[in-house]
């Protein structure tokens, strides 16, 4: 194949871009014959380049250089670093122009007194990975503002040693200190930043966001604080400006590569703390959503089996809506629409959304298992002097639980895995922790395998717990135990 020599050579190639960025529209408009592949992290794009799934990828030039420095093999090179230039700005809600005006005034002042130049030197000119966030005194007695970021990577936003760092972070913290504001930083997917700001879930968004006319229709942008240039990267062996020798990958022994990956992804900068915190969030959402869903499912089951047509139809409608709506769509609707004007923790929203979805499936499990019990047993219980409630509690329900547990266990495990999408509403779960680590190490393999193993351990542990419950409620086992005790 012909080697790439200039930007226009990507016109018919497979081009990787960040989902929802200006690069997407740029490639679609200028090179309609190109096949656009959309990704949510630079690590995924680089892995796709190395595995041959895409030919090139578009990244901010500064981010691209940081990525190339952190890639273990000397395979990736830059085709051009002048593909697209665009001013960057902080995003503000249209209903709060006063906050944007304050920021613009602060930015002018920072440019005038030399503070901006120091920041630019620290994060843009020099190596951002060696930059140290300065101490900034902030009394934090004023209004609380929430900054939404996607942690795309340095030099704009990253997580190092458990702390948010980068050009955008320092700029925002200096602004907050200047105005005496309290700051809370939340992480979400890049595509969720503008919806979160437009719906009032966050007050400001940042992370190398280009100022475009389309975005300006939904949000207000600050004055530009820096211009960014786009680099097109690909395998060196496919780029004409690199010699064959320089494009050859450097072989690394497997054990050393594994050891380096463990250190870089787990030990360095205390990254294991991100995994621990993410695991707690994932486990908490799963358990509480399952509890809520089980209780809700029991209620919906009662309504579904009721002879009252109104209750029966409400239950049918609820089950149809919940089972027919993708969980991600449901999660986004609950967060950005139902609770749009409510200041509520996204973790609680996740529990409510997953619980509501889980409840629809649980209700049908309960109903089918109850209906499978022979009606003669209910009649026998009533004939034996039990009330209908006692008959259900002591005769029907134990048998129904035995039948429903295997199916319930499978749905519970599916629920745990479904929680991996909560990053879209600014919840830093296990999957999001992995994304943050990958944004720093550009190692797509180790963090994903590590998270997969952790999800397996969590699911396996829950399966064991439910199996134990199944054994405990087994009437045959209970009768055998009582006979042994006698």
Image (spheres, helix red, strand yellow):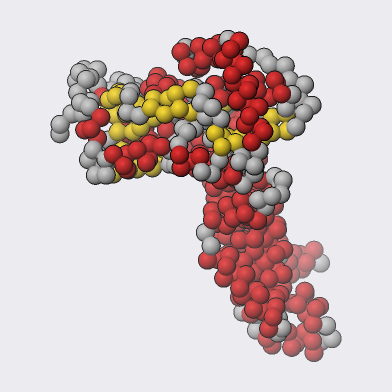
291 left or right of 199 in image = right
Q: Is residue 239 above or below residue 472?
A: above
Does residue 350 lie above or below 79 as drawn? below
In the displayed orientation, state which residue is furthest to the left.
1
Instruction: State which quarter of the image contains the C terminus.
Output: bottom right
Tell me where residue 166 appears, x and y as whole percent. Answer: 55, 22
In the rendered image of this protein, does residue 378 appear above or below residue 234? below
Quarter-of-image position of residue 480: bottom right
In depth, the one of 77 and 459 nearer the eye is 77
Where's residue 473, x and y in %? Answer: 71, 65
In the image, taking residue 99 as reference, residue 54 lies left or right, namely left
Q: Is residue 475 visible in this depiction of the protein?
A: no
29 above or below 181? below
Instruction: Residue at 21% x, 20% y: name it.
Output: 241
| Residue shown at 56% from the left, 30% from the top | 222
Number of numbered discs: 0
Q: Is residue 164 left or right of residue 258?
A: right
- The quarter in which the N terminus is drawn is top left
Quarter occupied by residue 76: top left
The answer to whether residue 92 is visible is yes
Q: Nearer the viewer, residue 171 or 45?
A: 171
- Residue 229, percent from left and from top: 39, 25
| Residue 299 in the figure: left or right of residue 430 | right
**In percent of the image, x 67 and y 60: which residue is there?**
293
* Residue name at image x 39 percent, y 21 percent: 65
Q: Quadrant of residue 387?
A: bottom right
Which percent across, then down, holds residue 421?
Answer: 54, 47
């Amino acid at each position: 194949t012909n080697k790439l020599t200039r930007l226009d050579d990507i016109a018919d190639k497979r081009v990787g871009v960040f989902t929802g960025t200006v690069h997407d529209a740029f490639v679609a408009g200028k090179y309609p014959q190109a096949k656009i592949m959309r990704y949510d992290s630079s690590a995924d794009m680089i892995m796709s380049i190395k595995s041959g799934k895409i030919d090139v990828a578009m990244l901010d030039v500064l981010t691209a250089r940081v990525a190339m420095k952190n890639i273990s093999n000397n395979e990736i090179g830059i085709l051009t670093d002048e593909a697209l230039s665009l001013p960057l700005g902080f995003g503000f809600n249209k209903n709060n122009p006063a906050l944007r005006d304050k920021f613009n005034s602060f930015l002018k002042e920072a440019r005038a007194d030399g503070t901006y130049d120091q920041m630019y030197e620290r994060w843009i000119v020099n190596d951002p990975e060696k930059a140290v966030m300065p101490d900034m005194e902030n009394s934090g007695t004023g209004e609380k503002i929430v900054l939404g970021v996607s942690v795309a990577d340095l030099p704009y936003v990253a997580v190092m040693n458990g702390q948010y760092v980068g050009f955008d972070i320092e700029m925002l913290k200096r602004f907050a200190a200047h105005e005496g504001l309290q700051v809370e930083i939340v992480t979400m997917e890049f595509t969720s930043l503008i919806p979160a700001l437009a719906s009032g879930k966050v007050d400001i968004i940042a992370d190398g966001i280009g100022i475009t006319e389309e975005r300006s229709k939904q949000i207000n942008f600050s004055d530009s604080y820096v211009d960014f240039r786009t680099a097109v990267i690909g395998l060196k062996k496919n780029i004409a400006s690199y010699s064959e020798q320089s494009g050859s990958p450097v072989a690394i022994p497997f054990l050393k590569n594994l050891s380096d990956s463990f250190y870089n992804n787990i030990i360095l900068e205390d990254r294991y703390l991100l995994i621990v915190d993410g695991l707690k969030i994932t486990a908490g959402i799963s358990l509480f959503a399952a509890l809520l869903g089980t209780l809700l499912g029991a209620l919906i089951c009662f309504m579904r089996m009721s002879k009252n047509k109104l209750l029966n139809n409400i239950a049918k409608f609820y089950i149809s809506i919940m089972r027919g709506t993708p969980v991600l769509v449901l999660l986004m609707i609950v967060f950005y629409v139902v609770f749009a004007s409510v200041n509520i923790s996204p973790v609680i929203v996740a529990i409510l959304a997953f619980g509501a979805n889980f409840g629809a499936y649980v209700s049908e499990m309960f109903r089918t298992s109850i209906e499978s019990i022979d009606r003669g047993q209910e009649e026998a219980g009533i004939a034996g002097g039990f009330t209908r409630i006692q008959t259900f509690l002591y005769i029907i329900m134990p048998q129904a639980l035995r039948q429903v547990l295997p199916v319930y266990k499978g749905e519970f495990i599916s629920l745990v895995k479904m929680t991996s999408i909560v990053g879209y509403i600014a919840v830093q779960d296990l999957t999001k922790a992995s994304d943050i680590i990958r944004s720093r190490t550009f190692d797509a393999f180790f963090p994903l395998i590590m998270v997969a193993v952790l999800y397996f351990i969590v699911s396996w542990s829950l399966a064991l717990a439910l199996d134990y419950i199944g054994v405990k409620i087994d009437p045959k086992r209970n009768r055998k135990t009582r006979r042994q005790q006698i």
